[in-house]
Each structure stands twice: as C-alpha cells, then as structure tokens.
Image (cartoon, rainbow, N blue to C red):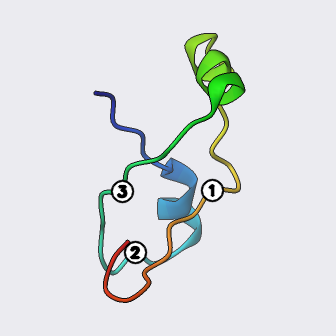
Amino acid sequence: MKSIENRKAWHDYHIIEKYKAGIVLVGCEVKALREGKGNLRDSFAQVRRGEV
C-alpha cells in the first residue's frame, strides 16, 4: 500500500495534527493513478462525529 503526502499543505498551512485516511476510487481514477496521472490538489479529509 502506498502512502501519499500533500507537501504543498506543509508549506501553505500550519499543521497541528496528522491523520491517516483511506480513499475510495472509481475505475477511471484507478486507471489515472496507474498511469502516473493522479492529482490530489483539491482533495481534503473532514472529521465528522469523531471519524475522519
């Protein structure tokens, strides 16, 4: 399993806590990642009811 980190977030924001979160991908997203064309630029995680 690969780990991805948003390096720009560390530069643009003051990070107080780190969380690990899984993602669910649909077919075209899996294909893009396998081809090296994945993009997480506008991605985010949100805490709801104590869960990420």
Which x, y percent locates residue 39?
Answer: 67, 37
Q: As drawn, is 33 to the left or to the right of 42?
A: left
Which one is in front in this view, the residue at disc 1 or the one at disc 2? 1
Along the polypeptide, which appears first: circle 2 or circle 3?
2
Q: Quadrant of residue 36?
A: top right
Name the amino acid, label 2: Ile
x then y, percent, for residue 49:
37, 89
| Residue at 46% across, 47% down | 23
Extreme top residue here?
Answer: 35
Q: Of the numbered discs in the image, which one, if any, rests on residue 4? A: none
Q: Residues within 10 Å of mark 3 (few under 14, many from 20)?
A: few
Q: Residues within 10 Å of mark 1 (few under 14, many from 20)?
A: few
Residue 21 tag number: 3
Instruction: Tell me the CA gap for discs 2 and 3.
Output: 16 Å
Secondary structure under badge 3? loop
In-image side of 37 versus 46 (left or right) = right
Image location of residue 35, percent across then percent down: 64, 10
Name the amino acid, label 3.
Ala
- What amino acid is labelled 1 in the image? Ser
Answer with mark 1 or mark 2, whichever residue precedes in sequence: 2
Query: Disc 2 designates what residue?
Result: 15
Residue 43, position as x, y percentages in the image: 63, 56
Q: Residue at x 36, y 56 (%)?
A: 21
* Residue highlighted by disc 1: 43
Q: Nearer the viewer, residue 13 or 21?
A: 21
